[in-house]
Image (cartoon, helix red, strand yellow):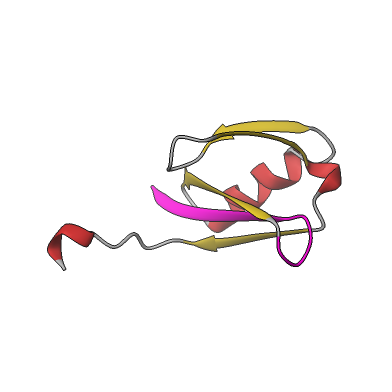
């Protein structure tokens, strides 16, 4: 599984990030497309619960994420 970062932008200053594990970028894109115009909910890496309607999002970005183990630094 690969990890992907999905960023939901509401305007130039406000955004929410979500991390998912999928087999490919194409599968991550399919997930985002399947959630179009509906409410989604998730808990972020800080333990904060988010609920948003994708209709109110202006831009959605998907990118593969390569997590860095900060304990090794």
Q: Is residue 7 above or below residue 40?
A: below
Could you say which is closer to the camera, residue 24 or residue 46? 46
Q: Residue at x 13, y 63 (%)?
A: 72
- Percent coordinates x, y for residue 62 in the rendering: 61, 59
Q: Is residue 29 magenta?
A: no
Left or right, 64 with reference to 58: left
Left or right, 73 with reference to 59: left
Q: Quadrant of the C terminus?
A: bottom left
Q: Is residue 44 above or below residue 11?
A: above
Could you say which is closer to the camera, residue 17 or residue 13? 13
Q: Residue at x 73, y 37 (%)?
A: 52
Q: How many marks?
A: 0
* Majority SS type along the magenta span: strand
Q: Residue at x 52, y 55 (%)?
A: 5
Residue 65 found in image quarter: bottom left
- Percent coordinates x, y for residue 29 in the rendering: 65, 52
Q: Is residue 10 magenta?
A: yes
- Percent coordinates x, y for residue 20 in the rendering: 49, 44
Could you say which is closer to the camera, residue 48 or residue 53? 48
Q: Is residue 30 above or below residue 37?
A: below
Left or right, 11 with reference to 67: right
Q: Residue at x 75, y 67 (%)?
A: 12
Q: Which residues are magenta?
A: 1-13
Q: Residue furthest left?
A: 72
Q: Is residue 53 above or below residue 23?
A: above
């Amino acid at each position: 599984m690969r990890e992907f970062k999905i960023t939901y932008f509401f305007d130039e200053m406000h955004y929410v990030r979500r991390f998912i594990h999928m087999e490919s970028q194409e599968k991550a894109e399919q997930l985002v497309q399947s959630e179009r115009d509906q409410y989604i909910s998730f808990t972020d890496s800080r333990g904060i619960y988010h609920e948003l309607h994708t209709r109110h999002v202006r831009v959605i970005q998907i990118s593969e994420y390569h997590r860095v183990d900060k304990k090794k630094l």
